[in-house]
Amino acid sequence: MDPVTLILILFVAALVLFATEWLPVDVTALCLLSALLVFGLITPKQAFAGFGSDTVITLASLFILTRVILRAGVIEWVGAALARRARSATIMLRAMLGTVAGVSAFTSNTATTAVFLPVVAGLARRAGMPPSRVLMPLAFASILGGTITVIGTSTNIVVSGALPAAGERGLGFFELAWVGVPTALVGLLYLFFIAPRLLPARDGAMEASLRAYLADLTVAPGSPLAGHTLAETGLGRDHGLTVVAVRRGETTTYAPGAAFRLHEGDTLAVEGPTERILAGKSTLGVVSRSELKLQPTPEDGDVRLVEAVVMPGSPLLGRTLKEVRFRERYGASVLALHRRQRDIERLGRLRIQVGDVLLVQGGSARLDSLGDHLVVMGDVTEHQRDLRRAPVALLLFAGAVVLGGLGVVPLAVAVLIAVALSLALRLISPEEAYGAVEWPVIVLVACMLAFGGAFESSGAAKVLTGTLSGVLEPLGPYGLLGALFVVTVALTQPMSNQAAALVMLPLAIGTAKALGYDPRPFVIGITVAASNSFITPLEPSCMLVYGPGRYTFLDFVRVGAGLTLVTFVVAMLVIPRVWPF
């Protein structure tokens, strides 16, 4: 069998597997790469070159830098700052969506959605709106922002990295902004005024799905809470924390009213999910006394945060944490406690029961030796935020973006240096850095880059694009751009955005050259189409809001189809004017 026929068969087989997801996309990509090697269509050097490419290095580094930004609480700080300045909740919700689009232009849209989700849900409650009216627009806003810069989504980076192999220059850092900014602006208007009319009014399931913890937090000097009433602080409205008691000196006030004014040194017994308590510790100027008194030794290892459940026979049962001298006994501190039956009580006074879940912080060695009567359920270290590191984290990220964006150094070099400095300054541990990398995406991209080279060198691309050009030539350049956009959008629904873009890219470039057009506008069209996946909830950002918003599959079809049409119209109007045929 000649190489061209074999490549085309493999291409069709991969397309079917990507669409059906009978195998995970990264496994499909590895199988494809293996087939190319087995049939001698590429050499081992060509096959493995993609794993060391600039694209893969850039992607992996950006995954790590995004985690650094999240660990420092930068994005949460932005969301909390906006929420505190809210006058009209409806106007603030719109401002929040605009902020989400702007932030996701430089960070992962999935991470942006995850961080802003509780903030936006809190604003919705304040405005008296059901979460279903705002959570889908949140996810869509984060996706829209991803089309503004080359690092906005991994799809943009993948396309940019694949272009040189096809004889085209990579995407400029802000090149996509010419179409990304208008698309985002028009898309946001759609989300402000049209989407709410199409979305159902359903109560959210988010709060019910989160484990509520009770924690004792003390108002530190300089805290923005000091001198304000509970109503003014927005602890419940904006931060999702319920104050069940306040201790001032020797006096404890249970269920304080909205007019209760907080002072420095007050200890609040607050109830809320893990993420809300940890975020509050970072942004509200409150501290856990037990955490401050804990002094881990070098032998303890890295400080971790885990959830541990109290088992039958535990020596903690029936006693308070102070009575058992938990900190001295285990070398760790309890930040919060969850109990199925809610007790209106301060954490320090609660007597431990079987099944209680403790949020415990301490050195790795200490936590590993908690014993059989206190079983670790899971590690939630990555949920911690440390705003003291935010300026350094933001400086490293911004420095990499500026240096890479201006072309002072290649983008891959800039982000790699930023990662190295983040590790050296201990903004993130090596283990967490490796865990932050989305390895299936890395494998997919590396394998598909190798396949793209084989597709071109074997002559299969020329054969396929020659056939397509004969069919599509009557459509003219606008028809060709529209057809490629629609096909790419269709492919992104069942398969990953990166796979859809890499499948369509060589076809678009080859067809454009065969018809005598500049390939650039068609490359841009495919990139925008692949990055904007709204019609189904399969995009990770959409999956994050799917459950909390209690959406159905058809909700995404109804709202997403209109936004896809808006994106298509803007792209068809803008692309030919900025990148002529």
Image (cartoon, rainbow, N blue to C red):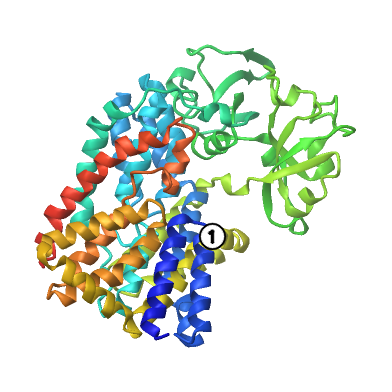
Query: Residue flagged by tag 1: what amino acid is it?
Result: Leu
Quadrant location, the C terminus? bottom left
The correct choice, above or below, for 203 with respect to 220 in the image is above
Provide residue 436's location: percent of width, then percent of height. Answer: 54, 58
Q: Quadrant of residue 266?
A: top right
Q: Is mark 1 on a helix, strand or loop?
A: loop
Inspect this view and state whether residue 72 appears. Answer: yes
Residue that numbered label 1 is attached to: 23
Quadrant location, the N terminus? bottom left
Provide residue 550's location: percent of width, then percent of height. Answer: 46, 30
**Residue at 72% across, 33% down:** 357
**Residue at 47% across, 61% down:** 17
Q: In which quarter of the image is residue 430?
A: bottom right
**Residue at 77% across, 48% down:** 367
Along the line of sight, the residue nearer the viewer: 269 or 337: 337
The correct choice, above or below, for 320 with respect to 116 in the image is above
Left or right position of 226 against 300:
left
Along the line of sight, the residue nearer the viewer: 345 or 373: 373
Provide residue 294's location: percent of width, then percent of height. Answer: 72, 44
